[in-house]
């Protein structure tokens, strides 16, 4: 009986330690996201209708290219990741944690003008050890903001197409 009580106390302490770290990192993600998270567009670029596919996406975006060259020769797609806490929960187990800031910028090469940027904060892991997939948390959500939405907000169809 004493062993069971001791084991329950030890497991409770381990569980609290793991989940308090997870909750602390989630609060930090929210705090930093409130400061500069999300999409900001500084300048839009109006393009002719033939520069868009039938889903309204710019046809010169090539996700299979080197990241900086994925928007072709006229624009730079810059992707930076800063780790606040390094870790690899997917490889080392869900108990490990990682927290990072992903910053994407789209820059016009001709005048080095920043057209827009996207900042995402995320946490992974911090769960009980086991064979399951680590949990994750991010701000803003993928539905609210992502690199595809940033591209669609910067590159817009010319007025002629919108009036037809």
Image (cartoon, grey):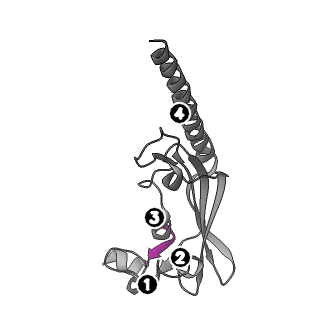
Q: Quadrant of the N terminus?
A: top left
The residue that mark 3 highlights is: 149
Residue 118 in the image, given as x and y percentages of width and height? 56, 61
Marked residue nearer the N-terminal end (1 or 3) = 1
- Real-space Cα distance between discs 2 and 3? 14 Å
Residue 63 in the image, given as x and y percentages of width and height? 47, 77
14 falls in the magenta region: no
Circles 1 and 2: CB atoms closer than 8 Å = no
SS under mark 2: strand
The residue that mark 4 highlights is: 19
Marked residue nearer the N-terminal end (2 or 3) = 2
In the image, the segment drawn in magenta is 153-157
Q: Nearer the viewer, mark 2 or mark 3?
A: 3
Q: Residue at x 64, y 46 (%)?
A: 35
- Real-space Cα distance between discs 4 and 2? 45 Å
- Real-space Cα distance between discs 1 and 2? 10 Å
The residue that mark 2 highlights is: 45
The residue that mark 1 highlights is: 48
Q: Residue at x 53, y 33 (%)?
A: 19
Q: Residue at x 62, y 74 (%)?
A: 107
Marked residue nearer the N-terminal end (4 or 2) = 4
SS under mark 4: helix
Local crowd at mark 4 within 10 Å, few (<14), some, or many (≥20)? Answer: some
Marked residue nearer the N-terminal end (4 or 3) = 4
Circles 1 and 3: CB atoms closer than 8 Å = no
Rendered image quadrant of residue 80: bottom right
Nearer-the-camera pick, 97 or 111 = 97
């Amino acid at each position: 009986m004493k062993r069971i009580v001791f084991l329950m106390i030890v497991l409770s302490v381990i569980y609290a330690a793991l989940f308090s770290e997870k909750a602390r990192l989630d609060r930090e993600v929210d705090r930093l996201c409130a400061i500069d998270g999300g999409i900001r567009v500084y300048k839009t670029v109006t393009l002719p209708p033939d520069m868009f596919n039938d889903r309204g996406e710019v046809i010169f975006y090539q996700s299979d290219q080197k990241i900086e060259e994925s928007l072709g020769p006229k624009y730079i797609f810059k992707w930076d990741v800063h780790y606040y806490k390094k870790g690899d929960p997917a490889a080392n187990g869900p108990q490990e944690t990682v927290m990072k800031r992903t910053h994407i910028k789209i820059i016009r090469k001709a005048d080095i003008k920043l057209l827009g940027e996207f900042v995402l904060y995320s946490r992974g892991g911090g769960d009980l050890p086991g064979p399951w997939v680590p949990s994750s948390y991010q701000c803003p959500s993928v539905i609210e903001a992502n690199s595809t939405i940033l591209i669609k907000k910067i590159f817009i169809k010319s007025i002629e197409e919108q009036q037809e």
